[in-house]
Amino acid sequence: MKRPVADAHGHLLFACGSSLYGVPADTASEVVNVPALTRVPGAPSHLLGVFAHRGEVLPVVDLSRLTGKPLEDTARRAVVVRTPRGAVALTATRVLGVSTLEGSFDRLGESGVHQHLRGPAHAEQGEVAVIDTQTFVEFLASAG
Amino acid sequence: MTASDHISGLVLCHAGGQRLAIPAQEVDAFEPAGEAARYAGAAFESDARAPADAKVLRHRELTLSVDRVEVFATPVPRLAVPSALSSSWGGALVCFVECAGELWPVVSLERLARGDGEAAR
Amino acid sequence: MKAPLEGRHRWLTMPSTFAVIIGLLLAVAYAWVAIDFPVGTRLSLAVVLGVLAGVINFIGDGFEQRRLMPLRLIAEGTVSPTRPNLLGAARAVASVPELSFWLCCGFIAVGAITTAILWGFVAEVPLAIMLRVGFIGLAIAPITATLALLLTQRRARPLLKEIVAAGLPSSELHRGLPTSFVLRQRLVVFAAIAAATPLLLLVDLALARMRRLVDVLAVAKTESIPSLADQQHLEGVWPVVGLVALVLIVVSVSAWLSGSSLGQPLRELALETERLARGEHGEPPFIAAEYESLAASGALAGIETQLLSLLTPLGRAASSLGSTTHQLGATRGSSQRHALEAANGTTLELARSAKEIAASAQSVSEFARHTLDTAQSGRTSAEGFLAAMREVRRGNQAIADSVVRLNKRVQQVGRIIEFIDGIADKSDLLALNAELEGNKAGEVGRGFSLVAAEMRRLAESVMVSTREIGRLIEEIRDATNAAVMATEAGVKATDAGAALAQSVGAGLQKIVEFANQSSDAMQSISLATSQQQLGTDQLVGAMAEILRSTEASSAANAQMKSAHQHLLTLATDLKGTISTYEVRTEKEGAP
């Protein structure tokens, strides 16, 4: 199912391991260095922990563990994404910057996290999977 | 009377190298170490084992063992649980607090006990 | 026009001929004294020896000249002195000392055996004497070859500098010369040769005299044995003493040459680092050396090049910071206030990071200047090498300790580089967020995004440079460690390392003393930086407060204007800091 994506302000692209992801730039709040994390009891494995940032508690999620290809080292940076449902920090090995994307925006899978990835979209740096941030944050809330 | 956005009376616990806090009102009693108690460290790392000198906290039928405890009386502001964690540990997470420069997850023994009861059914 | 490097190919190979002559004289003197020649055979030995020596020298010289063909072609004007040709000539020159060693060793050994055989048949001497003549030649060969190598090296080094002056940049020469980390092995071999040669000759002499004594006593009458024994003991004592002294002199001269050969490049390295610390940049001069010392001088040249490339993007960033503030200053209207708020806070942080990088670079160079200020006083040449040998035994351990302390200072420099790297990483992060904000602000934020992109490029190139400098620091550390191990190996086997130890050790001791004094500078850097960070947080908080409480857009614009003015001043300061480093890209005194 094609969904027209409001690309007026482009997407923030980042790499997690060998995969490239994009989030709409309006939902990307900032990029931070991942600090020392506090672990949460009973949390799923893709949730590495939380940290306090400007007075709120942000959960840190590792996309590579959700897609089943976990990285060997932990990533240094994280992209903070805000939706009406809540905020989450996604770990990134490299943040590339804001770009416009072309291509299709179909659902990339039917189960797990892949339902919330759209694409394949194309940028200068390669193929990108765009994250549908609204549904993704809801998915995280129910997956715990 | 403390404001609703503060919490006062916490038992700060260490288990398996990680931290968690429990509202003091929920702890019915402290008990010596026992085999039957559930080890809090296993919620972080599934193969963690309680040490010989573990402390046990009791709330009704639920017993939870941890490595060390410390009581903290000063009221501290609550920080909301992010939505991504709302169902962690069966929904036992109540809020987060900052104590002594560190972030602590606050876990409700009442909710844990209820969660156990539901799982048993 | 006179061709450059005229006649140098002959000049370079003269020392090996000289060394062979010395070795030959030593062998002849030894044979004369130590061997009982049958009557009339001395002359035939001299003739055979002379002929063979001439043939050997001719053939050996031919090999060396063939190796130096690239140099000869340039010297005779047959090919033009382009960079590839000069590099080929330089590689040939650098390889000649070791070639001389092997040629001398091989040819003298072969020559000794051939002499023994030829002479034996011509003069019909007994097998025992033939063997001894051959043996003496074999024993002399290694020390002669070592002498040839050291003397040739003393000419090869200035010749390499002449090649650089003829138009080959020293950085290209460093890249083109093969590096080998075999200093320790070479010194061990040299020590073995220096110890073994006198030992072998003296053992041979002692055995010969013992045999002679036994022969005499065997045919004597019993009662005259004691007096005969005394007589034999005294006979020929003075020639033997003279011979022993001669051998020891040759070995000692080789030891002195070896020591000064190691010490010279290290002195030049210290001088060059001083120049670097004073801020005089340009094409690094070529410091001639071998093995680990060559790698260290190459690493230093690489650091100079990297510093140059570190300073150039800083200068560019200063210009672009200044030119793009105009775009930001032109924005008006309360509808853009949100973008302006975000831009203001991040702009200040960007400018602050750039200032921190420049300040840290300045501190590094001041630190280097203070600690290496006394390198000049370390220059003492190895005079009175026989007396120095005794002192060196004691000084050996002190040298190893001094170099270990020097390594710690190198580590401190490494920590500064890490610190700069950390700042560059933070700047990259800030620029990312700035780009994001600029993008959200739409058209208004476009200029802002450009500044941010430039800042990211700057941060990336700084991190590349710091990684490179870190690698070069590792190479220097390896080179100094190799020097420690080589020194210990050499002195343990023999006193040959005496000259090196004395001259280098005194200089290093002074360097370390001043390094201790300048650790205060290090502490004030880290203190100033953490104070700056505190100030940054307070300032950003204060800025946010000011903007929030202002209602009228003209008031907000006034704040923006002053912040931009501040930015312009910072950009100018940055440019001024860069220009204090005299970047000389033209070679001094180029024709």
Image (cartoon, helix red, strand yellow):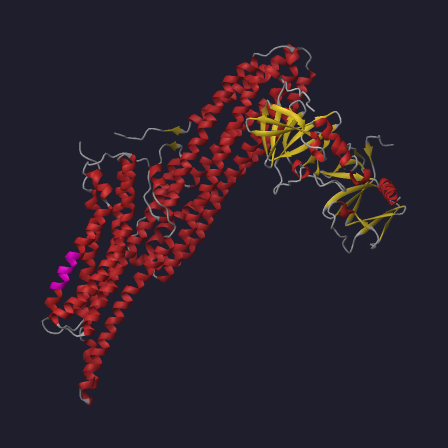
Q: How many marks?
A: 0
Measuring 50% from the left and 19% from the top, which residue is drawn there?
A: C322
**Is residue C518 visible to us here?**
no
> On screen, C267 above or below C388?
above
Left or right, C29 with reference to C184: left
**Is residue C504 visible to us here?**
yes
Left or right, C547 with reference to C188: right
Residue C269, position as x, y percentages in the image: 36, 42
Q: Where does the magenta region start and end?
A: C47-55
Measuring 30% from the left and 30% from the top, which residue is drawn there?
A: C588
Find out whether residue B79 is within the magenta segment: no
> On screen, C183 above or below A106?
below
Residue C376, position as x, y percentages in the image: 35, 42
Magenta segment, principal secondary structure? helix
Query: In the current view of this chain or complex, which residue is farthest to the right?
Result: B60
Q: Nearer the viewer, residue C401 or C463?
A: C463
Query: In the rendered image, which quarter is residue C486 located in?
Result: bottom left
Q: Nearer the viewer, residue C137 or C352?
A: C137
Q: Which of the image's four quarters has the C terminus of chain C?
A: top left
Query: In the rendered image, which quarter is residue C385 located in?
Result: bottom left
Measuring 45% from the left and 24% from the top, which residue is drawn there?
A: C576
